[in-house]
Image (tube, rainbow, N blue to C red):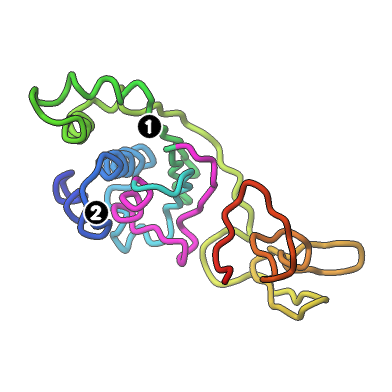
């Protein structure tokens, strides 16, 4: 695996700017790969052998994607929207998995690992760069439930929604009575028909004229 500085530079180039989340994400990815025994996740030897579950859609996730090469399009990056700055790394060959969480205490500890006289943003970045793993992260070995429909590779099943005719892949259809339904037809939807008079409280509706 490349050095931390090399990986951070690559991640920042992809992400667009340097921030504390980039530092945390790069270090989290490097530690996760070491723990599950993957030396270089982008080496062809490990193609589709590493799966990463990320729990937040923030800067650190971009860094994890950059370091590991895991992608949603490859089905090797999974998103669980828990709002936690955490990721779980799973080696499909050995079934070893570790969940790594960025600690809240590390935010206060940054000043102890950064040069004096720098602004708070820079202090956080520099502190996260040099802080020991055991202070920056909480690490726990875990077991991951990964169904056959979530594995990398081509779709293993195709179903057709009996209401709208939409093709649904990878076992993501819903069984409602005698019907096979896609997510929107089953009521599991994130959008609403424009102008339908839906009342949605505490949500921002995007796309309305």
Q: In this image, 183 relative to 13: left or right?
A: right
Relative to the observer, which residue lies in front, 66 or 68?
A: 66
Identify whether 166 is placed above or below 145. Answer: below
Residue 107 position by quadrant: top left
Residue at 42% from the left image edge and 52% from the top image edge: 50
Q: Is residue 72 magenta?
A: yes
Relative to the observer, which residue lies in front, 107 or 74?
A: 107
**Residue placed furthest toward the right:** 178
Residue at 44% from the left image edge and 47% from the top image edge: 91
Residue at 82% from the left image edge and 62% from the top image edge: 175
Identify whether 193 is placed above or below 12. Answer: below
Q: Tell me, for residue 11, which label it has, or none.
A: 2
Residue at 71% from the left image edge and 64% from the top image edge: 183
Name the N-terminal-most of marks 1 and 2.
Answer: 2
Q: In x, y percent, where is residue 150? A: 59, 58
Disc 1 crowd rating (10 Å Cα; few below 14, some 14-19, many 20+) is many
Q: How far separated are the C-alphas under marks 1 and 2? A: 18 Å
Q: Secondary structure at mark 1?
A: strand
Q: Which residue is mark 1?
A: 102
């Amino acid at each position: 695996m490349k050095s931390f500085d090399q990986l951070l530079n690559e991640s920042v180039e992809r992400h667009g700017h340097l921030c504390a989340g980039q530092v945390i994400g790069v270090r989290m990815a490097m530690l996760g790969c070491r723990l599950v025994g993957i030396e270089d996740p982008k080496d062809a030897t490990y193609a589709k052998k590493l799966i990463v579950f990320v729990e937040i859609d923030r800067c650190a996730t971009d860094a994890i994607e950059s370091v590991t090469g895991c992608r949603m399009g490859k089905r090797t990056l999974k998103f669980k929207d828990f709002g936690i700055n955490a990721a779980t790394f799973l080696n499909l060959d050995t079934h070893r998995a570790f969940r790594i969480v960025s600690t809240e205490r590390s935010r206060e500890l940054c000043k102890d690992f950064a040069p004096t006289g720098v602004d708070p943003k820079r202090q956080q970045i520099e502190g996260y760069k040099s802080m020991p793993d055991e202070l920056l992260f909480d690490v726990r070995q875990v077991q991951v439930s990964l169904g056959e429909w979530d594995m990398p590779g081509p779709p293993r099943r195709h179903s057709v929604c009996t209401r709208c005719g939409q093709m649904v892949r990878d076992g993501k259809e819903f069984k409602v009575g005698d019907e096979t339904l896609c997510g929107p037809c089953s009521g599991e939807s994130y959008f609403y028909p424009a102008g339908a008079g839906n009342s949605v409280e505490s949500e921002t509706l995007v796309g309305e004229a």
